[in-house]
Amino acid sequence: MLQETRRGETATADTVDRATELDVKLARVRELLRLRGASAIALSSRESLAWLLGGARVTVPTNGDPVLSAVVAEDALTLHIFSNERDRLVGEELPDAHTATVVDHPWFAPLPGVGSAGAAALDAGTLHETDASAELRAIRARLLPVEADRYRRLGAETAAAVTRVARTVRPGDTEQALAAALSHELIGLGAEPIVLLVAGEGRLDLRHPCRPGRDSGGARCSSWVHAGRG
Protein backbone atom coordinates (compact mmCIF):
# COMPACT_ATOMS: atom_id res chain seq x y z
CA MET A 1 0.00 0.00 0.00
CA LEU A 2 1.32 3.46 -0.88
CA GLN A 3 0.76 6.58 1.14
CA GLU A 4 0.40 9.74 -0.92
CA THR A 5 2.45 12.76 0.08
CA ARG A 6 2.96 16.07 -1.70
CA ARG A 7 4.02 16.62 -5.31
CA GLY A 8 4.01 12.95 -6.20
CA GLU A 9 6.05 11.67 -3.23
CA THR A 10 5.22 8.10 -2.31
CA ALA A 11 6.42 5.83 0.46
CA THR A 12 5.49 2.29 1.38
CA ALA A 13 4.05 1.84 4.84
CA ASP A 14 6.27 -1.15 5.62
CA THR A 15 9.39 -1.24 3.47
CA VAL A 16 10.85 2.24 2.93
CA ASP A 17 14.63 1.79 3.00
CA ARG A 18 16.87 4.59 4.18
CA ALA A 19 18.04 5.50 0.67
CA THR A 20 14.43 5.96 -0.45
CA GLU A 21 13.70 7.89 2.73
CA LEU A 22 16.59 10.23 1.92
CA ASP A 23 15.28 10.78 -1.62
CA VAL A 24 11.82 11.72 -0.34
CA LYS A 25 13.27 14.17 2.18
CA LEU A 26 15.60 15.72 -0.37
CA ALA A 27 12.60 16.28 -2.63
CA ARG A 28 10.86 18.16 0.17
CA VAL A 29 13.88 20.38 0.83
CA ARG A 30 14.28 21.08 -2.90
CA GLU A 31 10.66 22.13 -3.11
CA LEU A 32 11.45 24.63 -0.36
CA LEU A 33 14.37 25.91 -2.44
CA ARG A 34 12.11 26.45 -5.44
CA LEU A 35 9.54 28.28 -3.34
CA ARG A 36 12.23 30.53 -1.87
CA GLY A 37 14.08 31.05 -5.14
CA ALA A 38 17.33 29.78 -3.60
CA SER A 39 20.02 27.65 -5.19
CA ALA A 40 20.86 25.64 -2.05
CA ILE A 41 20.45 25.45 1.72
CA ALA A 42 23.00 24.54 4.41
CA LEU A 43 21.59 22.31 7.17
CA SER A 44 23.60 22.48 10.39
CA SER A 45 21.36 21.59 13.35
CA ARG A 46 21.29 18.10 14.83
CA GLU A 47 17.50 18.04 14.38
CA SER A 48 17.64 18.67 10.64
CA LEU A 49 20.70 16.50 10.00
CA ALA A 50 19.43 13.50 11.95
CA TRP A 51 16.04 13.87 10.21
CA LEU A 52 17.54 14.10 6.72
CA LEU A 53 19.84 11.11 7.26
CA GLY A 54 17.22 8.80 8.74
CA GLY A 55 18.23 8.95 12.39
CA ALA A 56 22.00 9.04 11.90
CA ARG A 57 24.04 9.81 15.01
CA VAL A 58 25.36 13.18 13.93
CA THR A 59 26.71 14.44 17.26
CA VAL A 60 29.47 13.44 19.66
CA PRO A 61 28.46 13.34 22.50
CA THR A 62 24.73 12.77 22.02
CA ASN A 63 23.80 16.34 22.96
CA GLY A 64 26.92 17.91 21.45
CA ASP A 65 27.31 19.91 18.28
CA PRO A 66 26.96 18.11 14.93
CA VAL A 67 30.15 16.79 13.35
CA LEU A 68 28.92 17.56 9.85
CA SER A 69 26.79 19.94 7.84
CA ALA A 70 24.80 19.22 4.69
CA VAL A 71 24.39 21.49 1.69
CA VAL A 72 21.33 20.54 -0.36
CA ALA A 73 21.21 21.92 -3.90
CA GLU A 74 18.73 21.20 -6.69
CA ASP A 75 20.97 18.55 -8.22
CA ALA A 76 23.38 17.57 -5.44
CA LEU A 77 23.82 16.74 -1.76
CA THR A 78 27.18 17.59 -0.24
CA LEU A 79 28.10 16.40 3.25
CA HIS A 80 30.87 18.36 4.95
CA ILE A 81 32.29 16.09 7.67
CA PHE A 82 35.06 16.43 10.22
CA SER A 83 37.82 14.11 9.00
CA ASN A 84 38.04 12.25 12.32
CA GLU A 85 34.34 11.30 12.03
CA ARG A 86 34.23 10.47 8.32
CA ASP A 87 34.81 6.69 8.60
CA ARG A 88 32.14 6.24 11.26
CA LEU A 89 29.54 8.33 9.47
CA VAL A 90 30.14 6.91 6.01
CA GLY A 91 30.56 3.33 7.23
CA GLU A 92 27.84 3.17 9.87
CA GLU A 93 25.38 6.05 9.64
CA LEU A 94 24.72 6.98 6.02
CA PRO A 95 22.35 5.02 3.76
CA ASP A 96 24.28 2.42 1.79
CA ALA A 97 23.01 3.66 -1.56
CA HIS A 98 23.48 7.38 -0.95
CA THR A 99 24.91 9.50 -3.76
CA ALA A 100 26.14 12.38 -1.62
CA THR A 101 29.51 14.00 -2.17
CA VAL A 102 31.55 13.81 1.03
CA VAL A 103 34.05 16.59 1.78
CA ASP A 104 36.54 16.25 4.65
CA HIS A 105 37.34 19.13 7.01
CA PRO A 106 39.85 19.29 9.89
CA TRP A 107 38.08 18.85 13.23
CA PHE A 108 39.02 22.39 14.29
CA ALA A 109 37.82 24.11 11.09
CA PRO A 110 34.37 25.70 10.70
CA LEU A 111 31.92 23.66 8.67
CA PRO A 112 29.93 25.41 5.93
CA GLY A 113 26.79 26.89 7.45
CA VAL A 114 28.00 26.56 11.05
CA GLY A 115 28.68 29.76 12.97
CA SER A 116 29.59 33.11 11.48
CA ALA A 117 32.71 31.78 9.76
CA GLY A 118 30.82 28.87 8.25
CA ALA A 119 27.99 31.13 7.11
CA ALA A 120 30.48 33.42 5.40
CA ALA A 121 31.82 30.44 3.41
CA LEU A 122 28.46 29.74 1.76
CA ASP A 123 27.99 30.55 -1.91
CA ALA A 124 25.72 33.41 -2.90
CA GLY A 125 22.12 32.21 -3.15
CA THR A 126 22.58 29.55 -0.47
CA LEU A 127 20.20 29.79 2.46
CA HIS A 128 21.36 29.27 6.02
CA GLU A 129 19.16 26.93 8.02
CA THR A 130 18.03 29.78 10.26
CA ASP A 131 16.67 31.57 7.18
CA ALA A 132 14.05 28.84 6.78
CA SER A 133 13.68 27.42 10.30
CA ALA A 134 9.86 27.55 10.32
CA GLU A 135 9.56 25.85 6.93
CA LEU A 136 12.04 23.14 7.93
CA ARG A 137 10.17 22.43 11.16
CA ALA A 138 6.98 21.98 9.14
CA ILE A 139 8.74 19.64 6.70
CA ARG A 140 10.18 17.52 9.53
CA ALA A 141 6.77 17.33 11.21
CA ARG A 142 5.26 15.46 8.23
CA LEU A 143 6.29 11.98 9.27
CA LEU A 144 6.80 9.23 6.73
CA PRO A 145 5.26 5.85 7.64
CA VAL A 146 8.73 4.50 8.45
CA GLU A 147 9.32 7.39 10.87
CA ALA A 148 5.97 6.88 12.59
CA ASP A 149 6.83 3.20 12.97
CA ARG A 150 10.14 4.12 14.62
CA TYR A 151 8.38 6.35 17.13
CA ARG A 152 5.79 3.67 17.93
CA ARG A 153 8.40 0.97 18.45
CA LEU A 154 10.64 3.18 20.56
CA GLY A 155 7.71 4.40 22.66
CA ALA A 156 6.47 0.88 23.31
CA GLU A 157 9.94 -0.47 24.12
CA THR A 158 10.71 2.49 26.39
CA ALA A 159 7.42 2.05 28.27
CA ALA A 160 8.21 -1.63 28.75
CA ALA A 161 11.71 -0.80 30.03
CA VAL A 162 10.34 1.73 32.55
CA THR A 163 7.79 -0.85 33.72
CA ARG A 164 10.45 -3.54 34.20
CA VAL A 165 12.62 -1.22 36.29
CA ALA A 166 9.68 0.17 38.30
CA ARG A 167 8.69 -3.34 39.33
CA THR A 168 12.11 -3.88 40.90
CA VAL A 169 11.99 -0.82 43.19
CA ARG A 170 12.50 -1.64 46.86
CA PRO A 171 12.83 0.51 49.98
CA GLY A 172 16.39 1.75 50.25
CA ASP A 173 17.04 1.85 46.50
CA THR A 174 18.57 5.17 45.52
CA GLU A 175 17.37 7.33 42.67
CA GLN A 176 20.82 6.99 41.17
CA ALA A 177 20.59 3.20 41.16
CA LEU A 178 17.18 3.32 39.48
CA ALA A 179 18.45 5.79 36.86
CA ALA A 180 21.40 3.49 36.18
CA ALA A 181 19.12 0.46 35.83
CA LEU A 182 16.84 2.29 33.42
CA SER A 183 19.78 3.57 31.40
CA HIS A 184 21.08 -0.01 31.17
CA GLU A 185 17.72 -1.20 29.86
CA LEU A 186 17.47 1.56 27.26
CA ILE A 187 21.01 1.19 25.95
CA GLY A 188 20.39 -2.54 25.71
CA LEU A 189 17.51 -1.75 23.35
CA GLY A 190 19.82 0.30 21.13
CA ALA A 191 18.32 3.58 22.36
CA GLU A 192 20.19 6.54 23.81
CA PRO A 193 18.73 8.10 26.99
CA ILE A 194 18.97 11.82 26.31
CA VAL A 195 17.00 12.99 29.36
CA LEU A 196 16.50 10.64 32.30
CA LEU A 197 14.91 12.03 35.46
CA VAL A 198 14.06 9.97 38.55
CA ALA A 199 12.28 11.21 41.67
CA GLY A 200 11.71 9.33 44.90
CA GLU A 201 8.77 9.96 47.18
CA GLY A 202 10.37 13.01 48.77
CA ARG A 203 10.87 14.81 45.45
CA LEU A 204 7.73 14.01 43.47
CA ASP A 205 6.73 17.69 43.49
CA LEU A 206 9.78 18.73 41.47
CA ARG A 207 9.22 19.35 37.77
CA HIS A 208 12.76 18.34 36.75
CA PRO A 209 14.31 16.14 39.45
CA CYS A 210 17.96 16.25 38.42
CA ARG A 211 20.98 14.94 40.33
CA PRO A 212 19.55 11.61 41.51
CA GLY A 213 21.16 9.98 44.51
CA ARG A 214 18.68 9.98 47.35
CA ASP A 215 16.77 7.04 48.75
CA SER A 216 13.87 6.49 46.34
CA GLY A 217 11.40 5.94 49.15
CA GLY A 218 10.42 2.61 47.67
CA ALA A 219 6.67 2.98 47.84
CA ARG A 220 6.34 5.75 45.30
CA CYS A 221 8.73 6.62 42.52
CA SER A 222 8.39 8.46 39.23
CA SER A 223 10.60 8.34 36.11
CA TRP A 224 10.73 10.48 32.99
CA VAL A 225 12.61 9.41 29.90
CA HIS A 226 13.46 11.07 26.61
CA ALA A 227 15.28 8.56 24.46
CA GLY A 228 16.37 8.47 20.84
CA ARG A 229 17.50 5.78 18.44
CA GLY A 230 19.30 6.07 15.14
Image (cartoon, helix red, strand yellow):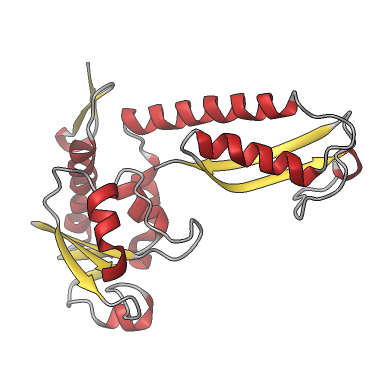
Q: Quadrant of the C terminus?
A: top left
Q: Is residue 178 left or right of residue 227?
A: right
- Residue 122 at what x, y percent from top left? 22, 77
Q: Nearer the viewer, residue 7 or 198?
A: 198
Question: Splitting the image into 4 quarters, where does residue 12 fall?
Answer: top left
Pick the front one: 52 or 85 = 85
Looking at the image, which residue is at 83% across and 37% down?
173
Q: Nearer the viewer, residue 175 or 206?
A: 175
Image-quadrant location for residue 7: top left
- Whether residue 96 sits left or right of residue 127 in the image: it is left
Q: Position of residue 21 (x, y in %)?
A: 23, 38
Q: Is residue 52 above or below residue 150?
A: below
Q: Give the residue at x 87% y 32%.
A: 218
Q: Is residue 230 visible?
A: yes
Q: Is residue 131 left or right of residue 83?
A: right
Residue 38 appears in view:
no
Q: Residue furthest left?
A: 75
